[in-house]
Image (spheres, rainbow, N blue to C red):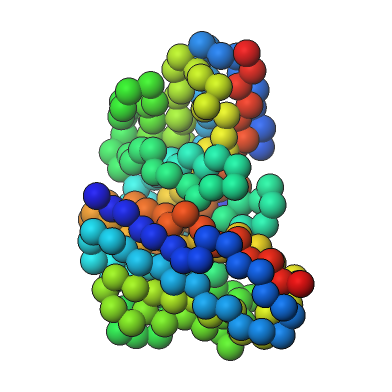
Amino acid sequence: GQNIDQPTEMTATEGAIVQINCTYQTSGFNGLFWYQQHAGEAPTFLSYNVLDGLEEKGRFSSFLSRSKGYSYLLLKELQMKDSASYLCAVRESAGNNRKLIWGLGTSLAVNP
Amino acid sequence: GAVVSQHPSRVICKSGTSVKIECRSLDFQATTMFWYRQFPKQSLMLMATSNEGSKATYEQGVEKDKFLINHASLTLSTLTVTSAHPEDSSFYICSAGGTGRGEQYFGPGTRLTVT
């Protein structure tokens, strides 16, 4: 079956670093995505990993290990505006099927 | 690039009426669009995959006759909630596919309240 696990909630301090983990069990794998969603708003795309390793984009980095079915999103120099839900999603197949399997999201609270 | 618009942003309707929500990809063509529903403090729930020129593919448990989807062109998909009831009140979000990587770009969402 399909399963994506993320912690439900996390708390961190402004200026610190936080790592949000995601493990997945899917019938296929063709990429993993991280999205950020602020309360009351739609998700916005953060990162994409399809090969093992680390992808860095400014304060945000995302890591993937396909053999372990594991990814993490690393947020550095946390800011108050980073308080949001972070969603992990997996694309199972290539081609025209762009359907993503979604995790339930991790609600991150950044405190001053 | 990859901008998706959604209209209306908010709608209040009476029980028993129908509501149409439009989703447009503004600067790219999308052969596939997705419709999601999200209840407060819950994750996204995929309702259906909208395919241009063909019938939508609905997820298990989603009523096809209640949630009508039309993907009329490569830039427009519509979701019509028919005979809406208070339990249909939710945040409806559409998304459209971007590059070959498969990421989805989301519209701003439509908050539906059925009284």
Q: Quadrant of residue A85?
A: top right
Residue A64 position (above or below residue B72): above
Residue B41 position (above or below residue A97): above
> Residue A70: x and y, percent?
46, 36
Left or right of B6, for residue B27 = left
Number of numbered markers: 0
Left or right of B79, for residue A48 = left
Left or right of A51, for residue A43 = right
Left or right of A45, for residue B66 = right
Residue A76 position (above or below residue A63): above
| Residue in view at x 56 percent, y 14 percent | A14
Which quadrant: the C terminus of chain B? bottom right
| Residue in view at x 39 percent, y 60 percent | B5
Q: Is residue A22 visible?
A: yes
Residue B101 position (above or below residue B87): above
> Residue B105: x and y, percent?
37, 53
> Residue B51: x and y, percent?
35, 76
> Residue A96: x and y, percent?
28, 67
Q: Is residue A88 visible?
A: no
Towards the viewer: B100 or B111 = B111
| Residue in view at x 50 percent, y 50 percent | A42
| Residue in view at x 71 percent, y 71 percent | B114
